[in-house]
């Protein structure tokens, strides 16, 4: 099926995209299972890392959908369906969380019997206990899934009915979701990552994870948007000005992440309290100091330099490279947050190599979720009343 110069016509995504997703998922699952056999503890933390990677992308994309409705943005309407498809990861989190929920005692020290001498953990036990943790996890994922289905259902229904009231409904639902998102993303960051070291705390940790999540989801959306437009799957009237807005958002959140990361470090360094500084000191010992210092370059300086100029924010090749780079940087960031908390006496080169299994599976999940969600719907929200304004967007 072809398109003329002015009208959007739905095209099916190529079957080889599905095959690629299946291959990546199968390879990741097979070698992930081998990883559990070789080094169960290492594999479990690697799985947690990939799980939080998917959480950040899926929930971050859902936040971007809600944000568009709340701020009444026009420019992003032609690509909103891309963002919705990325958010399809959210319902899958119900299944993906199960292996971790059955192994809490192997991941979290607070899930095991607490020594009577550990006054800090005992004081936190009303919050850090298995029952309350399961309830919080169910509530967080349940709310994400609920708002995902509400927002995407109304958006897709509008393609058929052209009912403008559906936009108003989604604006109201999005206004409710934004504070819900702030609370649940913070709670998830605290539960799944900060509580890995339950003696440590940071009041800015939730914002830190939020900044990385939005940046990661924006990267996936940017890469997917450029690829889809180049292959003719989006509206033919889209221009490079839409790329600029994506590039500008990426650049903004790169700086926001750096600001939050530096603020967290500066406040703890300045206070110099032993109960706070030990977390950073552990990441400046042994080989972790290399990753700690490299993170500054990988996650801030390189993408900052790539996207600094205005032409760079409109260059498809540079944007695609920046998107992939930022996703890699985000994964390294999560690795830096999670893996130093793994306490195991076993270490082998094979287990290190097998750590690539679950991120490979995660990429396969993203591709397959996007592919299957896009099969029975337009790639452009043709019923949205703001679509024409979005297509006419100019800098």
Image: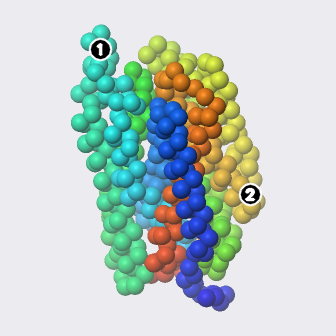
Side of 47 where 283 appears, left or right: right
Quarter-of-image position of residue 265: top right
Closer to us: 249 or 130? 130
State whether residue 266 appears in this view.
no
Give me the residue at 57% from left, 53% from top.
27
State whether residue 371 appears in this view.
yes
Closer to us: 383 or 196? 196
Q: Is residue 367 above or below residue 337?
A: below
Where is mark 1, residue-wise?
Answer: 115
Q: Residues within 10 Å of mark 1 (few under 14, many from 20)?
A: few
Residue 234 placed where, x, y %? Answer: 60, 76
For the N terminus, the image quarter is: bottom right
Q: How many marks?
A: 2
- Look at discs 2 and 1 and give the one toward the viewer: 1
Residue 124 placed where, x, y %? Answer: 29, 24
Where is mark 2, residue-wise?
Answer: 318
């Amino acid at each position: 099926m072809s398109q003329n110069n002015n009208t959007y016509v739905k095209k099916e995504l190529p079957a080889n995209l599905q095959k690629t997703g299946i291959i990546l998922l199968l390879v990741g699952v097979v070698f992930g299972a081998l990883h559990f056999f070789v080094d169960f503890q290492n594999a479990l933390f690697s799985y947690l890392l990939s799980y939080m990677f998917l959480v950040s992308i899926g929930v971050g994309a859902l936040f971007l959908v809600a944000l568009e409705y709340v701020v009444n943005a026009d420019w992003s309407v032609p690509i909103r369906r891309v963002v919705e498809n990325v958010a399809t990861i959210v319902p899958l989190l119900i299944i993906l969380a199960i292996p971790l929920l059955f192994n809490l005692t192997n991941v979290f020290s607070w899930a095991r019997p607490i020594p009577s001498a550990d006054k800090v953990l005992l004081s936190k036990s009303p919050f850090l206990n298995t029952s309350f943790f399961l309830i919080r996890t169910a509530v967080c994922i349940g709310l994400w899934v609920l708002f995902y289905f509400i927002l995407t259902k109304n958006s897709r229904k509008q393609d058929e009915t052209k009912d403008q009231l559906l936009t108003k409904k989604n604006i109201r639902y999005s206004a409710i979701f934004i504070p819900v998102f702030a609370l649940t993303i913070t709670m998830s960051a605290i539960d799944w990552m900060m509580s890995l070291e339950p003696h440590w705390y940071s009041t800015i940790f939730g914002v830190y994870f939020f900044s990385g999540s939005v940046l990661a989801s924006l990267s996936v959306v940017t890469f997917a948007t450029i690829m889809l437009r180049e292959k003719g799957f989006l509206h033919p009237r889209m221009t490079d000005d839409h790329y600029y807005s994506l590039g500008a958002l990426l650049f903004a959140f790169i700086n926001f992440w750096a600001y939050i990361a530096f603020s967290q470090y500066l406040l703890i360094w300045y206070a110099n309290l032993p109960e706070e500084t030990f977390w950073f000191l552990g990441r400046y010992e042994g080989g972790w100091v290399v990753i700690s210092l490299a993170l500054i370059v990988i996650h801030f300086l390189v993408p900052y330099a790539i996207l600094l100029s205005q032409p760079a924010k409109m260059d498809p090749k540079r944007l695609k490279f920046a998107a992939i780079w930022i996703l890699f940087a985000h994964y390294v960031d999560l690795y830096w947050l999670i893996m130093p908390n793994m306490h195991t006496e076993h270490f082998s080169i094979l287990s290190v190599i097998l750590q690539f299994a679950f991120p490979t599976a995660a990429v396969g999940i993203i591709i397959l979720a996007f592919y299957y969600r896009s099969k029975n719907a337009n790639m452009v929200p043709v019923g949205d009343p703001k679509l024409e304004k979005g297509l006419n967007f100019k800098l």
